[in-house]
Image (tube, grey):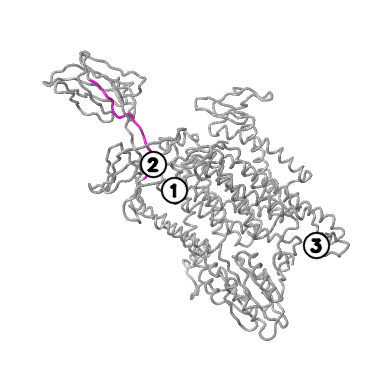
Amino acid sequence: MAQVQPAQDRCPDCRAVLPPAARYCPSCGVPVRPGTPVRRRQGEPSAWVQFLDAAWDFFASTKVATVLIILIALAAIGGSLVEQEGLYQDWRPPELYYPERYGATLGRLLMATGLTHAYTSWWFLTLIYLLVISLIVCSLQRLIPLHRALQKPTVEKHEGFLRRQPVQGEIPAVEGDPLAPLEAALKHRGFRTWRQGRGLHADRGRLGRYGPYVIHIGLIIAAFAATAKVLPGWDITEDLWVADGQTVTIPGTHLAIRNNRFVLETYPNGMPRLFQTQATLIDSGQEVLHHNIEVNQPLRYGPWWGPWEIYQASFREEPGAAQMELVWDGRVLGELELDLKSPQPEYSVNSDVTVVVERYFHDFGLDPETGDPVNKSREIANPVFLLRFVDNEGKELGRQALNVSLHEDVAPGSVVEGEIALRQTGITSRWYTGLRIHKDLTVPYMYAGLAVVMLGMYITFFVFHRQIWALALGDRVLVGGRTNKNRWGLQQELRPVIRQLGGFLTAGFGLGSGAGAPGLSQQPRSPQGRD
Amino acid sequence: MIIQETLLSVSFWSLGVAFFSYVAASIFYVAGIIGLRRAAATAAPAAATAAAGGAAPLEAVAAEEGAEGASRPFYRQAPDWAFALITLGTAAHAVGILTRWQGGGHWPTANMYEFIGFMAFTSMLAFQVIYRMYRFPVLGALAAPVAVIILAYSYVFPREVQPLIPALQSYWLYLHVSTAALGEGFFAVAFAGALLYLLRTRDPERESRLAGLALESVFWFASMLLAYTALAYLLRYVLNQEWIFVLDGGVARYHMPPLIGPQGSTPGMSGSLLGLPLPVAAAPAWLAGKNANTFVFAILMGTPVYYFLRALLFRGRSFREGLGNLARNLDADLLDEISYRGVAIGYPIFTLGGLVFAMFWAKEAWGRYWFWDPKETWAFIAWMVYSAYLHLRLNRGWEGRPSAWTAVVGFGVILFTLVGVNLLIVGLHSYAGGDL
């Protein structure tokens, strides 16, 4: 038998120990002998085919995959150090915000490089999809050869191969069939066994070898699920502000949501305890669902694979209505409530007097250039009514400019022409609940991908593939074992088997290794470690 | 109410028992190793004369012991004592967590004090699992101090039980945080194993200056954390020191002397310390003054502590040299396997708790399973670093030290994810923050 050089014993790509004269690595499937054809073809390949070959080989390399993983981690770090668009706490658009936040030069540089939206930037997405390609190519390249190698193992190995295994032992040969006791013991422990000539091969847990590919398939599913968000209608988000008692239609749908009441509760120390919207969902005019929407309890409506979901996202309190009484010559004629958001054009107090709202400013101010009254912002901050009082015949009784007081300790301002005027008696708040509406059809696919990933992780990390070879050599049986994971566990398993058959371990942790590595002088402290 | 307060104080004292058990276990582990080394050193000449160029020194020690009789010397017993102490500490820690759960009314992983303590607990739990597999006491000499430093650091944060804000009121608080922390505990053990591997396989002759400094900086960083913790605890809870700045931008509360004041403060406005005006300077706009101040103190205090520890433990030699000597006889392959095993168990658990459960909870609470919120991003980064670790091992030339470095860096990323992100980067998880 040809002498195998140590340099050729391990796969250049994955470092798995190679069987003698192997052309493909049994672990990862890459060709290990120069000149081994990867794909059969006739004649000189075209430039295009050569390019595809080169690309395939590039993406099939674990080194490339590892470098991509590291680059993605670095890119993600870069993005995390810069406040991302859509996540910063400021109302300004990015063009204004970033130069202010990071200085003019750096701010513009960050925006130009895409670091302000790192996770949707072309370089980040390029890296992610390169890794996805690498995942697919690596898996295809290795899965089928691995499957073949696991189904048809070489049973009778050369003695040199056994002497290179990380765990080795020797058993005195018995009369008759020297391999039979070992085969029986291994079978008893759930190993699958093969016999050929002087050789015995046994393995258990080969499922574990498929685990990484299961993880990769799960990740590919997850990547496709995340990508599917770009499909029209697959990922819808709407933010709605709904006042107490108000009904708002969800844009583009036949659904509407009514906020019956928003509830805010706090703990004695002032920390929030509960944000709750007592909501009613209306589908095509029919009330279909009542639900108390809370932070961890969204409302769901529709099929399980793509429901409409309504989340408690925010809340807002703003001045709602000012309570007024109409006073004429010291007598109270009646009461009314002026809505501060959108007041009615006129309010009839009784059959005699009507209050006409001529103009309303929710945040009164004067334009510095023209001197005209204007609204300074979109908030209800400084409400001013210009009112006219008329009787039932249309005759003007008086006029009033009324500055509504939003706080109890600030007196309302008022300029009156005539005997009649409104007097503020109170103010009420209006609560808005901030609801976020989602419909994301990618969720079931993403969760399916994650489930496959977790299944693959379990298989990869908790199912150990243990392979044992034995060779009958006259008066003794040589045993060599290896595993893809948990070498110590293999040693712990093999030790009692071999001792029971009257043998002993010759290589392993604490015993020196079979490849002639220097022995260690401090053994792991275990009962077995002292034998 | 009285029952609750009693439970909370039981929790406090149980954590104290756990803390001192871990400290004692660390000392026992280190003492055991040093004893073993000393014995080997004295036995070595005898062994050299007895067996020409062959027998390992420790076998000579064992032979010597055999001659002495059944009584094992202290350094032989120390690892068993240490492991018993760790078991005691973990049990007390579990009692502390359960009583705080009952006393506080919610699962105690809701603020920094609770979470960081929990992480110390899971790292000792993970150590127990790995130790029962490999019975490798030297690992404890690094893993136990890691737990000590982490648990000590938790005492820097306010201990009051805070009621849960609406976003945290979910059973995912139990599942997501505990599972992620368990995975991180295994990463802590993998870190200890990888660090030992780096110390063991270090070649002083061929080590580059940068590589040496990098290895040394791990210990320097640990000294910094330790020194900062001790100083912060002393000033804040023992001496009740506080420096308050009332400025236009708001109120800043410092628990350490403000060498670097918040933005807008003027030098000397907080009095002086040993003739030095406080603050010495105000922080620029892009830097949070309080964090910068903390960092300055960590360096100022950490560096002398580092040199003190090195003088105390290794007669002034560097940590990598001193610990490298102690690790000289260890089986590098076994260290590699232990470290790998820590990752191999921690990685799936962390994936489940830190990413999958996190996505489920994010979907439930915020409506999307992924936001690229800084905490999520850093969990993703940590996951990628450990993914890189698992793939590096498959490549010829990248297994061994490059992989081990990845496991060390990975734990650094984990710590930054847990602590740094909350304190330095604002995001959706910022409610879990405390202050430095």
Element under label 2?
A: strand
Residue A236 visible: no
**In which quarter of the view is residue A479 placed?**
bottom right
At 48% from the left and 65% from the top, the residue drawn is: A52
The amino acid type of the residue labelled 2 equals Ala
| Label whose residue precedes the other's in the sequence (1 or 3) | 3
**In which quarter of the view is residue B5 placed?**
top right
Find disc 2 in the rendering and name its residue: A313
Give me the disc on residue B59. 3
**Can you give x and y, in whole percent of width and height, for residue A453 in the image?**
48, 60
Q: Chain of mark 3?
A: B
Q: Judge whether B87 appears above or below B312 on screen.
A: below
Residue B269 visible: yes
Q: Magenta span: helix, strand or loop, mainly?
A: strand
Q: Are marks 3 and 2 in contact (CB under 8 Å)?
A: no
- Estimate the spatial distance between the alpha carbons at disc 3 and disc 2, rounded to whole Å: 68 Å
Tally of marks: 3
Have a look at marks 3 and 2 and say if they share a chain: no
Residues drawn in magenta: A311-325
Element under label 3?
A: helix
Q: Residues within 10 Å of mark 3 (few under 14, many from 20)?
A: some
Q: Judge whether B280 appears above or below B96 on screen.
A: above
Q: Nearer the viewer, residue B217 or A176?
A: A176
Q: Chain of mark 2?
A: A
At 34% from the left and 41% from the top, the residue drawn is: A277
Q: Chain of mark 1?
A: B
- Estimate the spatial distance between the alpha carbons at disc 1 and disc 3, rounded to whole Å: 57 Å
Find disc 1 in the rendering and name its residue: B362
Q: Is residue A314 magenta?
A: yes
> Which of label 1 and label 3 is nearer to you?
3
